Image (cartoon, grey):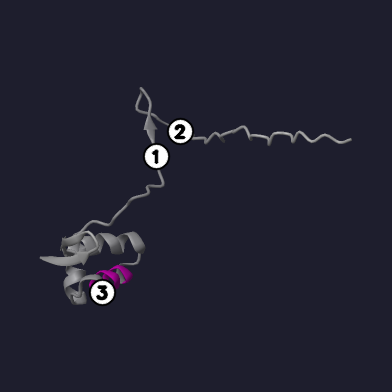
Amino acid sequence: MSEIWNTKYGKRKVRHEPATLEDAIFAAQGMTDDLEGQIEIASSLIDLPREAVKAALTKKAPLRLNSSRIAATGAGGQTRAVIVERRPVRRMVAQPAALNVRTA
């Protein structure tokens, strides 16, 4: 689907692609971990009945973006701790130049 807009630079074609069911489910999984909340959000995004969204959502694996565990294995297959530290950036602050004012 395309639509034509009149802009100050002339006519421009704008393509409109409605969200798919997979897009709506991905967005809902990013907003909440509650299954009922995900169904409600996804169904409201694409105007589908809750039953259709629930069937598609139960087939899809849950989204896990932030894993709380990270394990690194050593040479013998043993897990070892990985510590990540953030080093603060030290920046030099430029001092304003002294004013050359002469007093009499």
Q: In this image, 73 relative to 16: left or right?
A: right
Q: Which SS does the magenta portion mostly show?
A: helix
Rendered position, 79 above or below 61:
above
Element assignment for label 3:
helix
Residue pointed to by mark 1: 70
Element assignment for label 2:
loop
Residue at point 56%, 34% (across, down): 89
Of residues 92 and 19, the one nearer the viewer is 92
Q: In this image, 86 relative to 55: left or right?
A: right
Can you give x and y, in whole percent of width and height, for residue 51 in the image?
A: 18, 75
Residue pointed to by mark 2: 82
Instruction: Quadrant for the N terminus, please.
Output: bottom left
Element assignment for label 1:
loop
In front: label 3 or label 2 = 3
Residue 42 is inside the magenta segment: yes
Can you give x and y, in whole percent of width and height, for residue 75 in the image?
A: 36, 22
Three-letter amino acid code at the position of disc 3: Ser
Outermost residue toward the bottom in this view: 49
Residue pointed to by mark 3: 44
Rendered position, 79 above or below 30:
above
Q: Which residues are magenta?
A: 37-44
